[in-house]
Image: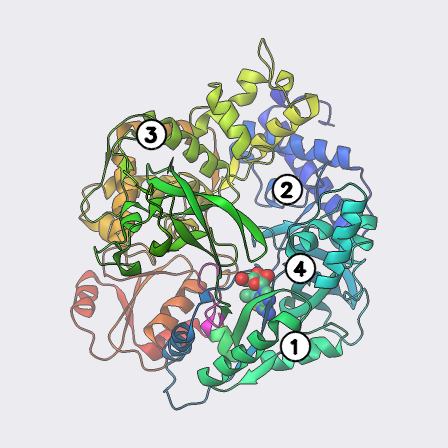
């Protein structure tokens, strides 16, 4: 029995045996908790075992098991919801803002599928409900789990709460054995008003809008509170399924309605972008009288086989789009302009406004983008707003669309006061006094202070702990600011030595104001838990300019491991040669992003800071999900010439789905060339290098069945 040996005293063999025992115990406890709804272990014991597992893995990274419990987020934190890894990711939608965007969407879908303009293509059109999404898992007709979207990959387990929602059936008949129903939890206007009246009566704080009220009500640790809140649910999509629901989107929604789910009555089948736009206009007309908030119309390709072919980009489906209602507008006075310094040194002007309600939300700050924007110019020097400059004291129009940061859109010159002041944009960083410069072609003025600029350092740290990056529970923007101000952390790597420095001794975290024994230990544990982290999160967390979440995922999949990624960034430093070509060949990486990446690794101070961070981490290899059995997983494939059975975009996406890397150029690293008619220099080079070459039919045969 190794249970009582402290982690520091374990031998390697004992550690291995103990990791196996913990994996087994925790897996059984998870099954009991999540699927049998009969917890057999109390939360504290579960947490302690999980922490022990993490501690052993941190001491013996090489022993980490493929089925490590630390990768299976199913923990039951003492003071929060347990986590649920979605069997099928919960994605978001890309947006359209006008008729042209909708027509372009239809055009893109057709182009991808290679459909001629005269071939009718059906789409569903339905309201976009302004609530929060929920995934309901039914097994053999019984509701076994309900989870929020979370970050799309991992959500929160809100099963007990979802059971209290009248629109959520707990038992359904004649359903597939496994059925995940997805939809939106929302609150009606009438219920929202009544709830807020009750909140105020009982001395509580009212909710800002029905969506916040719905989210706050669903995420109650005590399900009895949720029961007392009038939540509703519309079903509009699905996740994992053991058998298809129908052949079309509309058919599937009808099937969900037959199974007992509420589906939106304004769902229509359209046969052209003109019909979609007409249905949009109908829904917009009824918006004010629906009795619940909607913020647009969602269009989805109706044929599910075509949806399947279209597939997904990194975070959104190609087969759907949200056509948003126009933004809300209001006029107010511009009282001042503050300059904020971002993590990449950008100086951003922020409007300080006389508070004004825009579409139900009080706005007192709004972005002014950059110095040219204030002057009435776009990034190319063309006039915007008729070239009108915005001055402090002006009467300005504020624009707010959905969750987007409000912006100042216009200025009313007829109301300009005599004492209105033009804004002098600073040429020094207001935080560190370093020179702030504009590179040719950059609309943004940037602080040149780099790592010495406290604003950049703090923003980098905030980005590092943010949700899509390290997501450390208990370490948010506020804590980062305080720790930075007191010199406790100066760069990301310092987070991982916090416990060594402030867990014991003279100065301790638990003695800080607002902290105690438990919260300090929770933070140390949360940090410990993130030492083992996926590659994509690390790349994103570095906060490199132009490198967003989607690109980080693609880059991680391309290089697989941290070592390969880091070596490639150094090899590509000269911005030419094979490593550079390989980098810019990664889908979604252009020369600007690639330049930003390699420059970061070429700067000594930045590089040293990254090295100090990485020394604390166990970075998990990035692998494409579900590609086992794929004949092309991990291979580098190049397409050239004309493809006749599918478009280049579809071929590429399909190859990537099967785990292949698709590159634009042939090199010694290429494993396979797919050459259609008209293939030229690439086919020649492949032949010279002795690379296997297939025609389109050969390729389709190779991947058929995968
Ligand atoms: S379909 C794969 N349909 O909008 C995409 N989403 O901006 C599945 N939403 O996260 C989503 N009403 O929470 C879909 N009728 C509707 C919707 C809808 C609201 C939400 C959903 C999603 C977000 C994306």
Q: Nearer the viewer, residue 697 or 208?
A: 208
In terms of sequence position, does the residue under pointer 1 or pointer 2 come before the other? 2
Mark 4: which secondary structure? strand
Quarter of the render that holds ligand 1: bottom right
Does residue 318 belong to the magenta stretch? yes
The answer to whether one can see residue 57 in this image is: no
- Image quarter for residue 177? bottom right
Residue 257 to residue 159: above or below: below
Residue 254 to residue 630: above or below: below
Name the residue tied to disc 3: 430
Q: Are marks 3 and 4 in contact (CB under 8 Å)?
A: no
Q: Nearer the viewer, mark 2 or mark 4?
A: 4
Left or right relative to 279: residue 53: right
The answer to whether one can see residue 129 in this image is: yes
Q: Nearer the viewer, mark 3 or mark 2?
A: 3
In terms of sequence position, does the residue under pointer 2 or pointer 4 come before the other? 2
In terms of sequence position, does the residue under pointer 3 or pointer 2 come before the other? 2
Name the residue tied to disc 4: 134
Q: Residue at x 66, y 59 (%)?
A: 134
Question: Going by the picture, which residue comes out furthest to the top?
Answer: 506
Distance of label 4 from label 1 (alpha carbons): 16 Å
Name the residue tied to disc 2: 69
Distance of label 1 from label 2 (alpha carbons): 36 Å
Q: Which residues are magenta?
A: 310-321
């Amino acid at each position: 029995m190794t249970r009582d040996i402290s982690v520091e005293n374990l031998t390697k063999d004992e550690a291995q045996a103990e990791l196996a025992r913990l994996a087994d115990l925790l897996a059984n406890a998870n099954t009991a908790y999540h699927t049998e709804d009969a917890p057999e272990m109390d939360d504290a014991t579960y947490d302690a075992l999980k922490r022990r597992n993490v501690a052993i893995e941190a001491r013996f990274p090489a022993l980490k098991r493929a089925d490590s419990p630390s990768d299976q987020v199913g923990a039951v934190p003492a003071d929060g919801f347990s986590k649920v890894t979605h069997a099928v990711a919960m994605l978001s939608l890309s947006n359209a803002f006008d008729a042209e965007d909708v027509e372009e969407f239809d055009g893109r879908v057709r182009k991808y599928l290679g459909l001629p303009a005269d071939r009718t293509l059906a789409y569903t059109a339905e309201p976009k409900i302004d609530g929060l999404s929920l995934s309901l898992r039914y097994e053999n007709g019984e509701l076994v789990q309900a989870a929020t979207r979370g970050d799309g990959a991992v959500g929160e387990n809100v099963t007990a709460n979802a059971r209290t929602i009248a629109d959520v059936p707990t038992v359904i008949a004649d359903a597939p054995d496994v059925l995940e129903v997805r939809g939106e939890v929302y609150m009606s206007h009438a219920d929202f008003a009544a709830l807020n009246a009750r909140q105020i009566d009982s001395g509580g704080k009212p909710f800002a809008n029905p969506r916040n009220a719905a989210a706050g009500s669903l995420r109650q640790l005590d399900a009895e509170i949720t029961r007392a809140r009038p939540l509703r649910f519309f079903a509009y999509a699905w996740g994992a399924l053991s058998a298809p629901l129908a052949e079309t989107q509309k058919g599937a929604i009808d099937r969900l309605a037959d199974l007992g789910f509420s589906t939106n009555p304004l769902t229509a089948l359209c046969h052209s972008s003109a019909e979609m736009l007409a249905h949009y206009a109908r829904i917009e007309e009824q918006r004010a009288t629906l009795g619940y908030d909607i913020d647009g119309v969602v269009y989805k390709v109706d044929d599910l086989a075509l949806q399947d072919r279209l597939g997904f980009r990194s975070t959104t489906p190609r087969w759907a789009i949200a056509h948003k209602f126009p933004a809300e507008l209001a006029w107010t006075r511009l009282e001042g302009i503050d300059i904020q310094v971002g993590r990449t040194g950008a100086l951003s002007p922020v409007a300080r406004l006389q508070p004004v309600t825009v579409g139900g939300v009080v706005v007192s700050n709004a972005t002014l983008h950059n110095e040219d924007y204030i002057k009435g110019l776009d990034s190319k020097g063309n006039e915007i707003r008729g070239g009108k400059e915005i001055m402090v004291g002006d009467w300005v129009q504020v624009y707010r669309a959905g969750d987007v940061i409000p912006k100042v859109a216009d200025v009313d010159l007829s109301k300009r006061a005599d004492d209105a002041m033009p804004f002098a944009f600073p040429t020094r960083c207001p935080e560190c006094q370093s020179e702030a410069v504009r590179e040719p072609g950059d609309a943004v003025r940037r602080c040149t202070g780099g790592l010495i600029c406290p604003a950049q350092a703090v923003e980098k740290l905030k980005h590092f702990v943010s949700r899509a990056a390290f997501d450390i529970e208990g370490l948010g923007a506020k804590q980062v600011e305080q720790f930075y101000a007191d010199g406790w952390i100066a760069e990301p790597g310092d987070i991982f030595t916090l416990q060594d420095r402030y867990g014991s001794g003279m100065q301790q975290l638990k003695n800080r104001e607002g902290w105690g024994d438990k919260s300090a230990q929770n933070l140390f544990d949360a940090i410990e838990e993130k030492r083992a982290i996926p590659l994509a999160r690390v790349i994103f967390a570095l906060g490199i300019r132009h490198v967003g979440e989607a690109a980080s995922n693609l880059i991680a999949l391309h290089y697989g491991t941290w070592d390969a990624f880091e070596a490639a960034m150094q090899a590509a430093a000269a911005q030419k040669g094979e490593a550079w070509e390989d980098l810019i060949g990664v889908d979604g990486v252009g020369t600007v992003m690639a330049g930003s990446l390699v420059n970061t690794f070429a700067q000594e101070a930045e590089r040293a800071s990254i090295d100090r961070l990485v020394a604390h981490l166990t970075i998990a290899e990035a692998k494409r999900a579900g590609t086992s059995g794929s004949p092309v997983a991990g291979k580098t494939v190049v397409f050239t010439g004309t493809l006749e059975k599918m478009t280049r975009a579809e071929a590429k996406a399909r190859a990537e789905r099967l785990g292949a890397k698709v590159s634009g150029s042939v090199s010694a690293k290429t494993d396979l060339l797919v050459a259609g008619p008209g293939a030229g220099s690439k086919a020649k080079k492949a032949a010279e290098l002795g690379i296997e070459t297939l025609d389109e039919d050969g390729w389709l045969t190779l991947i058929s069945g995968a």
